[in-house]
Image: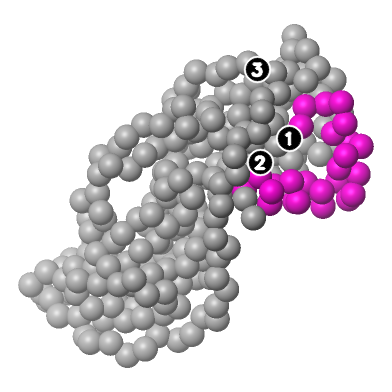
Amino acid sequence: MSVLQRFEKRLEGLVEGAFAKVFKGVVHPVEILNAMQREAEAHKAILAGGRTLVPNRYVIDLSPYDHSRLAPYAAALAQELAQSQAEFIGEQGWTVYGDVIVEIERGDGLDTGMFRVTAEVYTGGDVAPVPSYEQPPPPAYPPYEQPAPTAYQQQGPPPGRPVSGPPGGARGVRLVANDGRTYPLSIGSTVIGRGDQANLRLPDVGISRRHARLDYDGAQVVLTDLGSTNGTMVNGQRVSAVALNPGDMIQLGTTTLTFRVDG
């Protein structure tokens, strides 16, 4: 099932079966999602390491009539649009800063059936705007297919080799990202994710807010998946919990982290 098909199905549940009646004669949410996808495509930026950055904040201006009709569903609709856009960005292998945000506003001066999409790269404080455009309802783009995530049960970690390294250990144990960035590990727990509660934040929409945890006791490092949507891979194998060995390659979303031990 494509991103657009999943989005439409969730919308049907959102309006409790009144989908066709609510959206008859007004701009259709699928048209908005199509425009958001094109905005992401149009404003890609290549970062160091070959990653592709796209906007993560989308402001949707609707005509006064469309806005009044959709007002009872605006908050829920914005959430569904954000989720579907994050799925689309993730399956393209693109990167955003933080979460995908959608805001629905009243656009005075817009005729019924017209809407405006403004896309921005939002980093939590600073906003880097990119051009916006105004358009009539566009034709639908071809659907993009995405495999459904696999469910699994989390298990306890298997035994692993002790981590050798210099005295104190922590300063010699690190993760190296595929773009060359290095993340030293301290003794204790380190949560990896893209949310505010993560100790090691990675701007990758394929990574959950709290994706995985690293537990380092000075002798070994254990990686535990925290029930993430897309799972955690080590050396190409999906894992729930595993003790890491030097050189192991951890895959989270589109990010690869190599486990290194100095000394």
- Type of residue at label 3? Gln
Task: Please tell me whether the stretch drawn in magenta is mainly helix, strand or loop.
Answer: helix
Asked if residue 138 lies left or right of residue 203, the reply is: right
Asked if residue 144 lies left or right of residue 14, the reply is: left
Residue found 73% across the figure and 35% down from its top: 29
- Type of residue at label 1? Pro
- Type of residue at label 2? Leu
Asked if residue 261 lies left or right of residue 14, the reply is: left
Q: Earlier in the sequence, mark 2 or mark 1?
A: 1
Viewer-nearest residue: 30 or 216: 30
Where is residue 135 drawn, in percent x and y?
A: 65, 17
Q: Could you say which disc has been placed on residue 135 in the image?
A: 3
Residue found 69% across the figure and 31% down from its top: 31
Where is residue 260 drawn, in percent x and y?
A: 19, 68
Please give the residue where the numbered disc 2 appears in the rendered image: 81
Where is residue 152 drawn, in percent x and y?
A: 55, 78
Where is residue 187 drawn, in percent x and y?
A: 29, 72
User: Dot 1: within a 10 Å radius of its alpha carbon, few (fewer than 14), some, or many (20 or more) residues?
Assistant: some
Q: Secondary structure at mark 2?
A: helix
Please give the residue where the numbered disc 1 appears in the rendered image: 29
Range covered by the magenta-colored residues: 3-28
Colour scheme used in the picture?
A: one colour
Mark nearer the viewer, 2 or 1: 1
Name of the residue lying farthest toward the bottom: 159
- Asked if the magenta segment contains residue 73, the reply would be no
Q: CA distance from mark 2 to mark 3?
A: 18 Å
Q: Secondary structure at mark 3?
A: strand
Name of the residue lying farthest toward the top: 109
Q: Earlier in the sequence, mark 2 or mark 3?
A: 2
